[in-house]
Amino acid sequence: MNNPHPDEQPAYTASGDAEQAAEGVRQVIDWYNARLRDAREPGAGRDQVDRWREGRNQALDDLDRLEEADAGETVRIALAYAARLRELTDS
């Protein structure tokens, strides 16, 4: 398949690279941690904070899973977190 934007770097290359996948997961964890730090200020909704904690905890679990994941699972996690990061940063 030809890349319609050859000058752009893909969010993830399907090489099964665990370090690249872990970096994507860590970026999502960092996003959640920043929101949770900001939530210490008055006015943060409890439900939203709980969703951020839940998302961060899932990302931490997935980061641990990468240690023993096979190539297919590594790619799945990497793609899921690339999409999640886009979703979080676009909203």
Image (cartoon, rainbow, N blue to C red):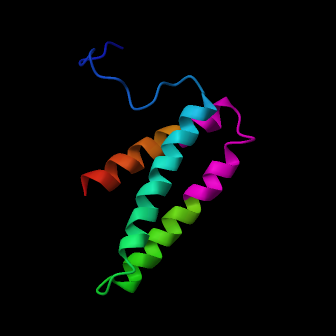
User: Which of the 4 image quarters holds residue 4?
Assistant: top left
Q: Quadrant of the C terminus?
A: bottom left
Above or below, 91 relative to 5: below
Give the residue displayed 35% in from the left and 23% down from the top. Answer: 9
Residue 67 among those drawn in magenta: yes
Above or below, 11 relative to 87: above
Q: Nearer the viewer, residue 32 or 4?
A: 32
Q: Nearer the viewer, residue 42 or 20?
A: 42
Give the residue displayed 36% in from the left and 72% down from the top. Answer: 38
Residue 89, image x, y percentages = 30, 52
Give the residue displayed 62% in from the left and 33% down from the top. Answer: 18
Question: Going by the image, does 10 lie left or right of 91?
Answer: right
Residue 58 among those drawn in magenta: no
Q: Quadrant of the N terminus?
A: top left
Above or below, 18 relative to 7: below
Question: Going by the image, does 50 lie left or right of 91?
Answer: right
Please provide the residue range marked out in magenta: 59-77
Residue 82, image x, y percentages = 42, 41
Question: Going by the image, does 68 lie left or right of 39?
Answer: right
Magenta portion: prevailing SS class = helix
Residue 61, image x, y percentages = 64, 57
Give the residue displayed 60% in from the left and 28% down from the top. Answer: 17
Above or below, 77 relative to 48: above
